Amino acid sequence: MDVVAHGLWGGALFCPRGRKNFLAGFVVGMAPDLLSFGAFHVMRPGWIVGRLAGEISGPPPFALLPDYVFYAYNVTHSLIVWAMAFFLLWWFMKGPPWLIFAWALHILCDIPTHGKSYFPTPFLWPLPTPFVDGITWATPEFLAGNYLCLVLVYGGLIFYRRR
Ligand SMILES: [Zn+2]
C-alpha cells in the first residue's frame, strides 16, 4: 500500500483519541516505509524529483537500491520484530504502547497488497516467511477502492464525533 494511505489508516485508528494521537498514528503508520525506502529517497533526491516530474515511472529497480533498504525493509515489516518492540516498550513505559498498533496495521495491510515480484512482506522475518503473492497496491482500481474506503471511514469518524 502507498505510504500516505498507510499513514491515513494508522491515523484512523487513533483519530477518536484527538488530533495529537491522530498525527502520531499517521507517522507511526508510515514509519515502516519511511525507515526503509525513506533513507533511499533522502540519499537520492534526484530519483524522486524525476519521478514527480514524470521522467521516471514505477518503483525503484532492485539494482538501484542499496543493501540497507532490504535489511531495513525486513526489520520494519516483521510482526516478530513488532511484537518484540511492543513488549519492550510495554516494559519500559509500564503500560501497553497502543500507538505502535499503527505499525502492525501497516504490516497487515502490506501482506495482501504486495506481489511476490517486488518486496513481498517478510512478516515472519527473521524466520522463513511464506510470502503472499498479493494484489499490487499501485493499480488504479486498488488505489481508488482504498481511498474510497478511507473517505468512508473518515466520514464515519467525523459523523460519530459530531453526535
Ligand atoms: Zn510497507
Image: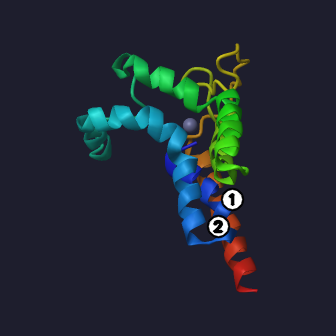
Q: Is residue 100 above or below residue 111?
A: below
Which quarter shows the C terminus? bottom right
Residue 112 seen in render: no
* Contact flag, marks 1 and 2 (Cβ < 8 Å): yes
How crowded is the residue under tag 1: few (<14 C-alpha within 10 Å), some, or many (20+)?
some
The image quarter containing residue 88 is: top right
- Per the image, the residue denoted by label 1 is 13
**Residue drawn at (69%, 53%) of the image:** 98
The location of residue 38, given as percent across then percent down, is 40, 38
The location of residue 51, given as percent across then percent down, is 32, 40
Q: Is residue 11 above or below residue 135?
A: below
Tag 2: residue type?
A: Cys
**Residue drawn at (34%, 21%) of the image:** 64
Taking the view exactly as shown, the residue that stands out farthest to the top is 128
The image quarter containing residue 76 is: top right
Query: Residue 15: which disc?
Result: 2
**Of 139 and 14, the residue lying toward us:** 14
Q: Is residue 116 above or below residue 37?
A: above
How crowded is the residue under tag 2: few (<14 C-alpha within 10 Å), some, or many (20+)?
many
**Of 95 and 16, the residue lying toward us:** 95
